Image (cartoon, grey):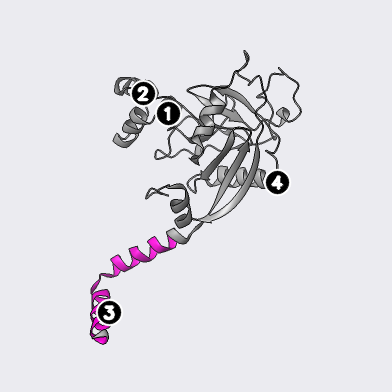
Amino acid sequence: MKKIYKLLFWCCLLSLPASALQAQSLSAKKKNKKEPLVFIDTDYGQIVLLLYDLTPKHKENFLKLAKEGFYDGLLFHRVIEQFVIQGGDPNSRNALAGQPLGSGDVGYRIDAEFDPRLYHKRGAVGAARDDNPEKASSGCQFYIVQGKKMTEEQIAAISKRTGVQFTAEQIETYKTVGGIPHLDQNYTVFGEVIAGMDVVDKIAAVETDSNDRPKQDVRMRMQVKEMSRKKIEQRFGYRFPDYL
């Protein structure tokens, strides 16, 4: 009987089209693929970031700086509730209380990497930048989107003003989850929060001065740890979209 079952199994397997077998093989490879996650520790808790392969220049640069310890001890120096929490200014490491921040950098920019599938939903990680025609990113400053929920009318008005066409899925996300749609295709989105949005919300709610700097310093430390996609899904409940 066991031989019959084995024979039936192999017959069924052989009857599958080559494309189906190939798809299964690719799916298995994706599940086992290792992803470098960035763990940001703060006094308010831990935030976990997943960075996108679709933005390789930003991903490589951010991981390099994080592994080198560049971000350790820096501040979230710009905090605006229902908008973003921003950090990565090297001048913030030893900044005096009340000192204006946001102009520090590493001496280079990163070419913009826009992809219409990557957008400023709640939890998106984006690259800050100065006003330059190429929309090139800062080499070190980044932000995490808190954002707010938008109405369909608001989203339509933003689309008309910016020329960005939102998909049905993106519109639904902006309506039900929230985000900052007017930044799409204007600032590079290169990752997202997969755990710790409650921590982002706590930081976004702190008291700030007239320059949007928290009155009580919010410092960060970063670690990079590799984890398989399968384990990421199991541990954090994250589901990788097809395009990733």
Residue at coordinates 47% horizontally, 55% vertically from top-left? 229
Q: Magenta region: which residues?
A: 3-30
Amino acid at circle 4: Glu
Real-space CA distance between mark 3 and mark 1, rounded to the nearest whole angstrom: 49 Å
Q: Which residue is mark 1?
A: 179
Q: Earlier in the sequence, mark 3 or mark 2?
A: 3
Real-space CA distance between mark 2 and mark 1, rounded to the nearest whole angstrom: 8 Å
Residue at coordinates 47% horizontally, 22% vertically from top-left? 82
Q: Main secondary structure of the magenta part?
A: helix
Numbered mark located on residue 10 in the image: 3
Q: Which residue is mark 2?
A: 150
x then y, percent, for residue 35: 52, 53
Q: Earlier in the sequence, mark 3 or mark 1?
A: 3
Real-space CA distance between mark 2 and mark 4, rounded to the nearest whole angstrom: 38 Å
Picture layout, residue 50 above or below residue 145: below
Query: Is label 4 in a helix, a strand or a loop?
Result: helix
Residue at coordinates 45% horizontally, 57% vertically from top-left? 230
Do labels 2 and 1 touch, CB within 8 Å? yes
Real-space CA distance between mark 1 and mark 4, rounded to the nearest whole angstrom: 31 Å
Residue at coordinates 35% horizontally, 25% vertically from top-left? 159
Q: Which residue is mark 4?
A: 68
Picture layout, residue 29 above or below residue 90: below
Amino acid at circle 3: Trp
Verify whether residue 18 appears in magenta: yes
Query: Is label 1 in a helix, a strand or a loop?
Result: loop
Real-space CA distance between mark 3 and mark 2, rounded to the nearest whole angstrom: 53 Å
In this rendered view, identify the residue nearer to me: 231 or 92. 231
Is residue 155 shown left or right of residue 216?
left
Q: Earlier in the sequence, mark 3 or mark 4?
A: 3
Is residue 103 shown left or right of residue 116?
right
Query: Is label 2 in a helix, a strand or a loop?
Result: loop
